[in-house]
Image (cartoon, rainbow, N blue to C red):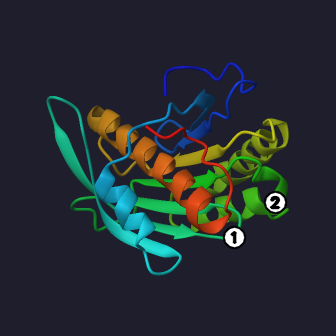
Amino acid sequence: METACVSAEAECRPQIYGWDARSQTWSGPYCLSPLRVSRRLRDALRNAPGRSWYGRVNSGAADQEARFFVLMHALGDCAVALIYCDDSKSGPAEIVMAIPPRGSARLRPDFAFEAVAFARFLGAIGEGDAQRVDELMAAAISTAPREDALVFSISTGLWTSDLDYLLSNCVEQVATAALEWLAERELNIPSACPPR
């Protein structure tokens, strides 16, 4: 999530925005670089019998690995994923909403409000921040190029900050997989991420 989005003229690049509950800060847009999604995750989503999937996602770097559990739902206009750390009993570490390319034109009019209300219900956004996050999401949706996929990530603060890079890697994998899943299964549109 280091590279700021420059242009989507040549290819459709997913833009990712984020809210961090710990610091109460908004970030983005950043380009979500196409990642190599694990074959296991891709196959699991492709073979999911319905519009929901639950399973394990490993995320790691050369020196450390973490195990996350993901609950993902394909809705009519987006995918929503809740990412739980291995031993979490208190709620998701991250909430991810993936909107496919050209999908912002089909979003429900109250999408930002509903997303924030859901995150607030889960305790990821405080009452004092809800309106601000709603306005930031709505502004991002209205100003993003229609061709771009959008990803909104809400960090709940339940994951330890010194291991944020592991959670970020998981968020990127889940977002990329969700966009592919929507493209292949739900909306029959070109994938936001070129095949590898």
Residue at image position (44%, 51%) is 174
Closer to the camera, 6 or 135?
Answer: 6
Q: Where residue 144 sits: x, y (%)?
A: 78, 36
Q: Which quarter of the image is occupied by the C terminus?
A: top left
Q: Where residue 20 sits: x, y (%)?
A: 51, 41
Mark 2 vs 1, N-terminal side: 1
Tell me the CA gap for discs 2 and 1. Answer: 9 Å
- Per the image, the residue denoted by label 1 is 76
Q: Amino acid at mark 2?
A: Arg
Q: Is residue 175 visible?
A: yes
Closer to the camera, 70 or 137?
Answer: 70
Q: Which mark is residue 18?
A: none
- Per the image, the residue denoted by label 2 is 106
Q: Amino acid at mark 1?
A: Gly
**Helix, strand or loop for disc 1:** loop
**Helix, strand or loop for disc 2:** helix
The reply to whether discs 2 and 1 touch (Cβ–Cβ < 8 Å) is yes
In-image side of 172 versus 194 (left or right):
left
